[in-house]
Amino acid sequence: MNLITEDIKYGISTTPEKNVEKTLYFRTKNELKHNSYFQNELKKCYGKFQSISCLCNNNKKLYLTSKNITGSAKYFLAIHKNTGTEHKENCLFFLSKENLVDNEGNYHSSIFEEPTYIYQPTTSEKKDTEEKESQRKNTYYNFCRDFIRDSYSYAFNKKNKDAKSRLTLKNPSELDFRDSFFDNYENKENNLIKNQSIKESIPKNHTLVFGTIRENIFEQLDNPKDTYSINVEKLEKEFEINKKTNKPEFKSYKLNNKKYKIDHKRLLLTQNLIKNFGNIIEGPYFFIGVLQKKEWKDKKTKKTITNYKMVRMFVHPIYSENQKISFIESNYERNYARQLFDNNIPFIKPMSDTDFSKVHSRFVNYETNERDKDNNKIWKRAYLKYRPDFIEFYENHIKITEVSGYEDEQYIKLMNRKIEHYQREGEKSNGLYQANEVKGK
Ligand SMILES: [Zn+2]
């Protein structure tokens, strides 16, 4: 049911061999870098003239080049000279005034800040700043999706590092997810910010806050105001002084109730993230926000006044009960996730096309008749052209599940294409993979 973000996927067309055209979809540059299937396609196109083009502009063929990341076996896509502004403004390859994410998918810390407004700007300066802000905000959303996806994938793989087969796979708990999330946040070795932890990259006077929202914060939009107050449960680490060493030691994670201010425009933009075909996906949500701190001296009392405002707000609907968590994209999916948890079925709910490629090959590969140069049989994992709603693991098979529910014509068409694709992959794998359509209603 993941149409919520389908329209912000980016497409490229590749022709590594003559007459073989492939269309690839992905959502962030980072995803391209960490997905082995995409990497393999880029490798095939490496050094081949005009073999890749972007699908954002119907009126013009915009070529991209497969390039090698210096000192690594990874590939990335580069735009052709002077075509950067010809891509659609919401395309990943549109050359913005700022370089918010480099070719290799590393984010820059300006995505956490609002661009500075010029005092009494001209009309064109105002438009410039608005454009900048819109690009920063959208890039921040992509960053959040990558951040959650990396953390969840890491938690899943860590939980199952010793599992021998699908039979012994386990779902990571909410605590496992928090561990991975904080690890990603504090560690220099994260995939999102270059040579720095995410925590260190947050600009001065800004704070990254995250956690859970259980209240319907969007209800307030019915009575428009300039500023709203939202209640969130902020996820924090709790420390305790070790009496022997006299040093603080990590004790547990805690959700602290906080109230933050957010302006009308921002809350409205955030609401768009949880709309699916005009339907609002109910909470709870996981949120990642940026608080901006402003300080000034009161002229009369000479006291310093401090004000915090939410300048970035990303939310993602979740299933969150009994210490279990899953990032879902519709109310139907939340019900389905509950069923899977209740029946102890290990599964992943892909946030992007990369999640599946991160699952260890011993759980997902099947034997083919193809041979490599040393005459060994080649093992493969299913090629998932679309992002499934759920991938469920059973002893002898893997279910690729779509949870249907909406009646929109376009939605049903896409659903049928997806199921057909999974069925073909199922045949190729001699039945290891099975397409599974679930009626959400
Ligand atoms: Zn483009």
Image (cartoon, helix red, strand yellow):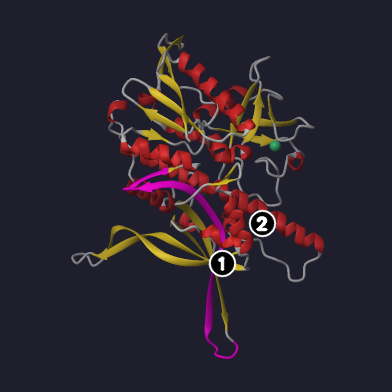
Inspect this view and state whether residue 157 appears. no
The secondary structure that dominates the magenta segment is strand
Disc marking residue 133: 2
- In the image, residue 430 sits, relative to residue 174, either above or below, namely above
Q: Amino acid at mark 2?
A: Glu
Q: Residue 424: x, y in percent?
A: 51, 16
Which image quarter: residue 278? top right
On whether residue 13 falls in the magenta region, the answer is no
How many numbered discs? 2
Q: Nearer the viewer, residue 388 or 354?
A: 388
- In the image, residue 370 sits, relative to residue 211, either above or below, namely above
Report the residue that reaches farthest toward the front. 441
Give the extent of the magenta segment: 299-326
Give the residue at x 46% y 46%: 148
Report the residue that reaches farthest toward the bottom. 300
Q: Residue 205: x, y in percent?
A: 53, 67
Disc marking residue 349: none
**Which of the marked residues, 1 or 2, is nearer the chain's N terminus?**
2
On whether residue 324 falls in the magenta region, the answer is yes
Q: Residue 110: x, y in percent?
A: 60, 56
Q: Which structural element holds mark 1?
A: strand
Which image quarter: residue 47? top right
Q: Looking at the image, in which quadrant does ligand 1 appear?
A: top right
Give the residue at x 49% y 39%: 351
Provide the residue designation for mark 1: 228
Mark 1–mark 2 Cα distance, whole angstroms, equals 21 Å
Q: Amino acid at mark 1?
A: Tyr
Q: Nearer the viewer, residue 46 or 290?
A: 290
Inspect this view and state whether residue 96 appears. yes
Q: Is residue 343 left or right of residue 210?
A: left
* Mark 2 burial class by Cα count in 10 Å: few <14, some 14-19, many 20+: some
* Mark 1 burial class by Cα count in 10 Å: few <14, some 14-19, many 20+: some
